[in-house]
Image (tube, grey):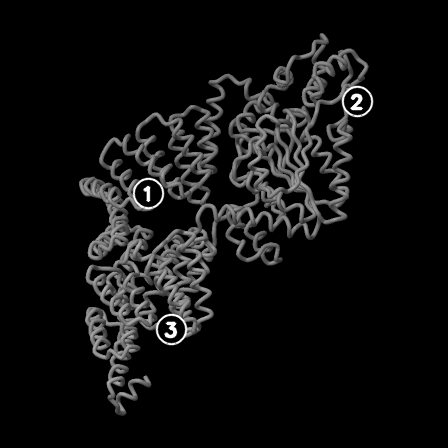
Amino acid sequence: MTGEIRGQSEDQRAFVGRKAELRQFAGLVEACLESGQGQSVYVRGEAGIGKTRLVEEFRAMALERAFACHTGLILDFGIAKGRDAVRAVVRSLLGIAPGSGKEVRRAAARQAMAEGLLAPEREPFLNDLLDYGQSPQWRGVYDAMDNETRNRGKRETVVELVRAVSARTPLMVVIEDLHWADGITLAHLAALTATVGEAPVVLMMTSRIEGDPLDAAWRGSTGGSPLLTMDLAPLREAEALEMARGFMDATSRFATSCVQRAEGNPLFLEQLLRSAEETADGAVPGSVQSIVLARMDRLDAPDKQALQAASILGQSFGLDALRHLLNDAGYSCDGLIAHYLVRPEGGDYLFCHALIQEGVYNSLLKARRRELHGRAAEWFSGRDAVLRAEHLDRAEDPAAPLAYLEAAQGQAEEFHYERASTLAGRGLELAMEQPDKFALTCFQGQMRHDLGSVPESIAAYEEALASAADDTQRCRAWIGLAAGMRIIDKYDEALEALDNAEAAAEANGLSNELAQLHHLRGNIYFPLGNLDGCLEQHELALNYARETESLADQARALGGLGDASYMRGRMKTAHSHFRRCVELCREQGLGRIEVANLHMCGWSGMYLNELQRALQDAMESAEMAVKVSHYRAEAIANSLIGFITGELFGEYARAKGHFERGLVLARNLKAKRFEANNLCNLGSVVFANGERSRGLAYVEEALQICRETAMHFVGPWVLACFARVTENAQKRREALREAEKVLKEGCVGHNFFWFYRDAMQACLNAGEWDEVERYAAALKEYTRPEPLPWSDFYIARGRALAAHGRGERGEGLTQQLNE
């Protein structure tokens, strides 16, 4: 032997070098305790340079100063569900042990909410972070959120939790190996970096220099928050010799050779020194890989096989999975621990360094790797769809592409769209068979649509259409294309795609697709003003949805039928459809459909004179829309609140605030029709509140927008409002004539109600009693198929006031006017 190896354990061995970094960290900890203001620290260096060992020393120093420490490890492969770095830190902050079941996680979350660690509205995001699904209370709300709202909510929840826990005890949060981090994790870290300066928290991050992800864009996203970067240099020769003394006589020739060969890399030096007993000829191995192989060869056969099998599972692995690979239910990792190759970590095991795992893995013959990955895929089947797919991939199994699709669909069901898209993308890279390629491409199209990347979604469906093998596949691609084209107002192209899809669906008896395409076509007919076609299409959609027993498609069809009835002025029928739609959504947790229809319960209910219930629907809709960042629904709900409180209850100041909010949202959405509607309503309440010239200006601006875009949505409504507020008799008459012409050409049903109401009022103001009677009769005729309490009231009011204006008097008329 060239040197005597000493029996010190790794924990007993003294830390060597990095004195400047240790002093810097000690000062940082003291400053954090004194000021209550934390710091983000970024430790960078090449593989094996000692980042983890230095952070362990930092952690020990923090623990001595009463910091609580929580760690998350980013891995390049083999991350089990719920074990990613951010989720690991959240569980640690809540005192949840690794591997705890759903009930334990749910109980910890309830306790955290009860203790006030998080605001009540953070609950759905915490549910997601703890991977136990949404409660009935939050399921619909979470479903309704767009992807960015969910991601932002989770970031804010983590930040809020860290701040709340740090108020009880100072924290050190460690996230290791950022060079393997994805975009979601990096966004979490940016949010934490922007926060720790306001709380007693040290955020410690590590990364290899190669692959460092913290670029200028990331640093910009932290809002200019300070980040202390420590770039680790190789150990000096004196420090390396001091490290060698922990293993053997540092003056020995072998120790000196090891120090020179390692060139200051602590991991390489440690592995060289650990190989001393078996290096009888004094030769120094040339690389970490060769050392790892030599040390592995010295293991007993069972431990060697276990180490190789463990490398298949990744840097972190569970004992049960390892035993499955070995087909040995009694295997223990004690031998691997004794040789400093793996260590226990939170109920599982971790290779002592990623380079060790990589070295062992690379030593396996390709056929043996494929075999072990195949057995790993068997183990994860039914346990973790993502890991099953990844192991099938490495096993080069032809089932891998569809396994990736299954995993991606599972991630999408949990609203993890970026992860789902990444998995599907890998499946596409592997797919060789046409059905696999088609299914994965369509899934990518749907993900891009849900992520708001509509042009990319259309491109994916065009690719799917080009590769489609039969009419069934072409039908599905056409429907996906139409859904995207509708969003960007390419109505003619969308309708052509739906015509093609319908022919294919009918020829092949595709009821699911028929429900979808009829609903889509009905939605396109709505803005085009095709009243009969809109109703017909949604009726067909509902029939097919019932045939397939798809509750989501039924809810969509009911909402579509509500829209179609609303367009035709059949407000009772519309209200019935919208109410049934919302009730079904609440039963099934279909939040995206609910938030798009709840405000319409209020609008249609208003015509039934159910004003308090309509106001309640509007307020609930606005609250839900804010929670899920559905700006269109929020704009429409605010408009309804303003309308009821202002036009009908006379609460002008309150109404004005809601119309102004709706106007801001409409302008942000670039939704000109909603902008015109809010301007008109804002002008009406401002005028009624005494600001006559300002109110008229708002209405004139609304009318100008209608002329520039389309008159059929609110044009007659705005024209009648203008006629009511203008003092110019000629302009009043011209506005009323123009509005009646638009009504004859066809427009959305609400125009008839509000035109006739305001036209009657304008003529009452002018003393044109016969015109009042004419408009009252016209409203009566319009609502003859479905009379409404709202219109009956205004018809009776107009006629009574006109009679009184002519000079009629009498007890009956007086009683009617009082009513």
Which class describes the residues within 10 Å of circle 1: few (<14), some (14-19), or many (20+)? many
Residue 605 image offset from top left, x and y in percent: 33, 68
Q: Are marks 3 and 2 in contact (CB under 8 Å)?
A: no
* Residue that badge 3 annotates: 648
Amino acid identity at mark 3:
Leu
- Camera-side residue of 715 and 93: 715
Q: Earlier in the sequence, mark 3 or mark 2?
A: 2
- Rendered image quadrant of residue 455: top left
Separation of marks 3 and 2 at Cα, in angstroms: 85 Å
Q: Horizontal placement of 221 versus 424: left or right?
A: right
Foreground mark, 3 or 1, reads 3
Q: Residue visible at 25% across and 61% down? A: 565
Pick out the residue farthest to the top: 281
The answer to which of marks 1 and 2 sits earlier in the sequence is: 2
Identify the mark nearer the N-term, 3 or 1.
1
On screen, residue 141 versus residue 244, left or right, reads left
Q: Is residue 688 left or right of residue 69?
A: left
Q: Quadrant of residue 310?
A: top right
Q: Can you identify the residue that label 2 sits on?
A: 242
Q: In which quadrant of the rendered image does the C terminus lie?
A: bottom left
Q: Which mark is residue 484?
A: 1
On screen, residue 238 above or below 501 = above
Q: Amino acid at mark 2?
A: Glu
Whole-percent x, y for residue 322 in the image: 55, 29
Q: Residues within 10 Å of mark 3 (few under 14, many from 20)?
A: few
